[in-house]
Amino acid sequence: MTDLVTMAQSSWPEPMAPATLAAYLLLSGAMFAIGLVGFLTRRNLIVMFLCTELMFQAAGIALVAFSRFHLNHTGQTFVIFVLTVAAAEAALALALVVLLFRQKDSLSASVWREMKG
Amino acid sequence: MGAILDMLCSTMPGAATLASVQHAPAGASEGAWWVMLIPGLPILAVLLVTGCAIVDIRGKIPAWITVGSLAAAFGVTLATYLEYSGGTAITYGFRWIDFAWGAGEGQRFVADFAFYVDSLTCLWMLFVTGLATLIALYASEYMEHDIGPNYCRFFAAFGLFVFSMACLVMGDNLVLLFLGWEGVGLCSYLLIGYFFKKDSAVQAAKKAFVMNRIGDLGLLIGIFLTFAQFGTVKYAELFELVGPYLELVREGRVGEVPVLVQIIPVLFMIGAFGKSAQLPLYVWLPDAMEGPTPVSALIHAATMVTAGVYLIARTYPLFLVSGWALPIVAWVGALTALLSATIGMAQFDIKRIMAYSTVSQLGYMFCGLAVLSSAGAAFHVFTHAFFKATLFLCCGAVMHGFAGQLDLRKLSGVMKMSGWGIVGGAMLVGCLNLAGVPGTAGYFSKDMILAESFVTPGPGYQAIGWILLITAGMTAYYTFRVFFRVFVGPEYFEPGDEHHGDDDHGHDHSHAGGHGHFHPHAPGWAINLVLAVLAVGSIAAAGAYFVDRGHHGWVGGLVHASTANYEEGSAAFLYHIDDSTEIVAPVDGADGHAEAGEHAEDAHGAHGTILGLDPHAVMYYISAVFGLGGILAAAWLHGPKGAWGLGLGSRTEAAHSRADALMDAMQPVARWAQHKWYVDEFYDFVIVRPLRVLAHAFHVIDKLLVDGLVNGVGALPRLIASRVRPLQSGELHGYAAGMAVGIAGLVLTVWIVLAGVSG
C-alpha cells in the first residue's frame, strides 16, 4: 500500500516528451476531424452515430495524452467517466435508431425533418 | 368623496347653521310594526311566485298568491288608515345605510329602512294596493294563455312593482324613495318587455328605461344636494329644516332663501318629469303599450306615473320655497296636457289614445300642484287612478277578445255583442269620468285644478287655465271618439293577428288563421268582476268630494293634514324677487288668494278671473260646457246613427265617419298629430342619430388606434420571427453544420482574443 502511494507520488513514470504529446494530439485531431466530416456528410443514422463515437474517443485520446504529459490523473479519470456514459448512450442511441427505422423503414436521417419553423 | 362633500358643506351659505344630523325623528311618533307588512306582503308574494317558477307549477297559483298578498296588503293599508290619528308615524325597520367620514356635523350619512306614515302616504297606498289587487285579479284571467314559467315571471315582476311603489311612497327618507323609484323603473322595464321575443316590445322597454334614467339623474343630484345642504335625507328632519325658509317666504323675503335650496326642487322636478311622463321625457309612456294590458293599467293608473306627482307632493315644502320650480312645473304640465291631447285626437289605436290621455291627465296633476292646489292634484290622481284603470282594462278586454285588435276603424258596436255588456258599461263610466261630465269624479277633480289655475297669480297662469280648459274639451272629444266608434254603432269587427291562447281554452270555433270563422271571446268572470268593481269605484270616487267639504273633499282633507298642504302666501313664486332682496310686496292677489272653497264667496277683484267672473263660482259650468262640447263634437263626427249617437251621428259602418272629411280638410295638421308631432323622429334626429354617429366614430377609433397599438405590439415579433424562422429547416445536417461552424467561430474568436492579449 505504502509502495503504491509512493509510486503515485514519485516522478515515475517519466513525464512525456512534448514531441510525443504533439503526435498524440495530431492523432486526436485527425480522428475528430474524420468523425465530424463523417457526421456531416453521411445520411445513415448508424454511421452518424459511429462518427459521434469517433469524436468522443478523439477527445478521450487528447485528454489521456494531456494527463500523461502533466502527470495529472484528472484527465484519465474523466475519460473513464466519458466511456461509461458513452456506453450507456450507445445502448440508448441504438435503441432509438431501431425505433426510428421501424417508423419509416429507412435509416436515412433526411426522412426525419418535421421539426422546422 | 367624503372630503369633497365636507368641503361643499362648509362653503355653502347657511349650511353651518342648518346642517345638523339628528338621529331621533323630530315631531313624529313611533308607528305600528305591522305597517311593514304593506311592502312586506308583496315581496313575500314575489318570493313565493319565484318558488312556483322553480318547482314548475302550471296553473293559476302564482296569480292567486299575488292577488291574495296584495289584497292582504290593501287590508293592512286600510287598517293603517283607520288607525291613523293625525301627525306622522315612523315605523323603524333597520339601519340601512350608515357611514361617517369624520366626527363633525354633516359628516355622517344615515338612511334607515323605515316607513313614514302620514295622511298623504295613506291616501297613496290605499289606491296603489287596492288597484294593484284588482289589476292582478284581472291579469289572472288576461294572462292565462301564458300559464307556466312566463305566468310566474309576470306575477313576480308585478309583486315587485307593488313592493317598489310601497318603498317609494312609504319610505321615510329620500334614499328609500330612490330605491322604490329605481325599482318601479326596473319593473316597468321587465313588464313592458314581457313579450321579449317581439322587437318592438324590447325597444319600448329600453326606451322607457333610458328615458326614466335621464329623469332619475336629476332626482339623484337633487338628493345629493339635499344632503349637502341640509345634512339629512329624512323627511321629518328635512321639513323641520325647511321651516325657517318657509317663514322667510311668508314674510316676503324670498331673496334670502339660498339659491341651492331653490335649485333642489328643480332637480326633483326633472326626476318627476321622467317618471310621470311629462315634456320632454313623455315619449316612453305611449310606447309602454307594448306590455300586456294589465301592466299598462298598473303603470298608468296606480303605480309608476303617479310617482312623480307623489314626489312633488311629498317634498311640497321644498317646492314652495323655490321661486322657479312650480312655475316651470305648471308650464310643462300645461303644454304636456295640450300636446298629448292633440296627439290623442288623431290616433287610431285605442290603447295608445288612452296612453296619451294619461300623459295629458298627468299634465293636469302637475298643473294642480303648481297652481298651489295640491289637494286638487291629489284628488285628480285618486279619481284618475280609478277611471284610467277602468279604461285600460276595458281596452285590454277588447284586445283579449278580438285577438289583439285595437284599431278603432276595425271595431264597432262591441257593447251590443253578447257577453260584452259589462265591458261596455264600464267603458262608458270611464269615458264619462275622463271627459269630465258633470257629476262624475273626474269632473270634480279637474275643476279644482282648473279653478285654481285661474285664481293663482303665477307667471302666465291665466293662460295655463285657458290651455287646460281647451284641453278638457279635446279630452272629452277623443275619449268619446273611442266610445262612439268602438262600443256603439253597427256591429262589426276584424280580428287582430294574435291567435295565442285561442286553442288553449277550448274555443274550438276559433282556429289560428281562420279569420273567416273567428268569434270574439267575451271576457270571463275575473275580468268582468274587476271591471264592475272599478266602474262602481269610479262613480263612488265622486262621493269623496262631498265628504269633507271644508277641505275640498276627503282627499283634500288628507292632503291638508300632511306636509303637502299649502298655506296662504307661503309660495315663493307669488313674490317678485329683485336684486336688493328687500321686496316684501306680493303680486296682486296673492294675499287675496282664496285658499279653499270656503273663501270662494268673499272673493274680490284681486282674484284672477275668467271672463270677469269668479272662477270658483263659474268653473263648474264652464268646464261642463267644454266637456259636453267635446262629447257633442265626437258624437257628430263619430257617433252612429240613432240614439247612441245622441241623434247627431251618421256613422253606418266601422271604418268611416264624418271625421274623415274633417281629417282631409285639416291636412297637414292632422297628419302631424297622427305622427305624434314627429317628436320621436325629432329625438331620433337630434339625439339618437348623433350619438350613433359618435358611437360609430369611436368604434372606428377603437378598431384602428387602440386595437392597432395592441395588435402592433404583438405583430412586430411575429414579423421578425417570420424572417428568421426558415433557418430552422428540420434538416439534421443543417443543425450539425451550424453547430460545427459556431464552435469553430467561437474557438477562432477565443484564439484571436488570447493572441491579442498575449501579443
Image: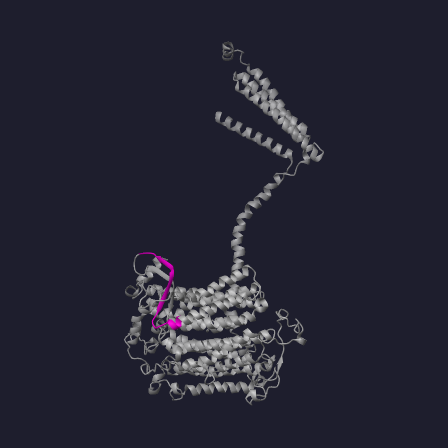
Q: Residue furthest right?
A: A105
Rendered residue at 35%/61% (across/down):
B110
* Residue B392 in view, yes or no: no
Residue B634 versus residue B138 in the image, above or below: below
Q: Residue furthest bottom?
A: B647
Q: Nearer the viewer, residue B239 or B54?
A: B54
Q: Nearer the viewer, residue B466 or B530?
A: B530
Task: Judge left or right: residue A2 versus residue B557.
Answer: right
Residue B131 lies in the magenta stretch: no
Residue B83 lies in the magenta stretch: yes
**Residue B618 sits in quarter:** bottom left
**Residue B504 sits in quarter:** bottom right
Rendered residue at 48%/25% (across/down):
B758
Task: Judge left or right: residue B159 versus residue B736.
Answer: left
Q: Nearer the viewer, residue B202 or B131?
A: B131
Magenta region, residue range: B80-102
Which percent across, then down, holds residue B225? 36, 65
Which percent across, then down, holds residue B86? 34, 73
* Residue B739 in view, yes or no: yes
Which percent across, then down, holds residue B271? 43, 69
**Residue A53 sits in quarter:** top right
Which percent across, then down, holds residue B682? 51, 72
State the quadrant of the N terminus of chain B.
bottom left
